[in-house]
Image: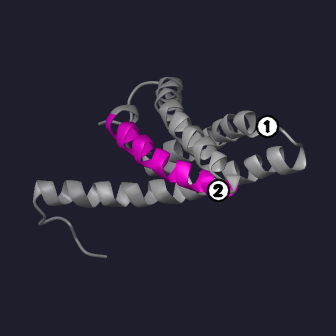
Amino acid sequence: MQSTESWTRPALRVWTLTQRFQKFVVVGAIGLVVNQGMLYLLVSMTDVALALASPVSIVISMIVTFTLNELWTWHDRGHGRVGQRAVMYGTINSGGLLINAGILLFLHGHGIHYLLANLVGAGLAAIWNFGLNNMITWRK
């Protein structure tokens, strides 16, 4: 592993942000498995309407990803009570929920399989979620 001791402050910030984003992607992949699994279970196995199954699946995955991000991705950041960060995370990710579910329903309405449409929506929502959570929920 390369030493970062001689790096400039801007280079170190980019490096740290890159490392954090990589962790966020791993956590997001786990959350996506939870989201896709719950969505499949609710829609295909129990016949819940897609418009209801999507937000339920996203909320369950948000609980999983908050816990993993708190313990791993941003373990060294965030001040105050964990409950306050959980509320902020939920608030920010509710925007991601709207992005994800909106894209899912739009694409599915245009003939795209719901699980593929969900992947597209989740990918775009992840950009929103990372940017705002990095700046607000787990700020220095």
Where disc 2 sits, the SS reads loop
Residue 67 shows in the view: no
Which region shows up in magenta?
A: 115-135
From what the image shows, is residue 41 above or below residue 26?
above
Residue 110 part of the magenta segment: no
Picture quarter with the N terminus:
bottom left
Circle number at residue 36: none
- The percent position of residue 86, horizontal first and vertical second, equals 53, 29
- The residue at which mark 1 appears reads as 49
Q: Which amino acid does label 2 sit on?
A: Ile
Q: Residue visible at 61% across and 53% down?
A: 117
- The residue at which mark 2 appears reads as 112
Earlier residue among tags 1 and 2: 1
Residue 100: image quadrant is top right
- Is 37 on the left-hand or right-hand side of 110? right
- The percent position of residue 98, horizontal first and vertical second, equals 54, 34
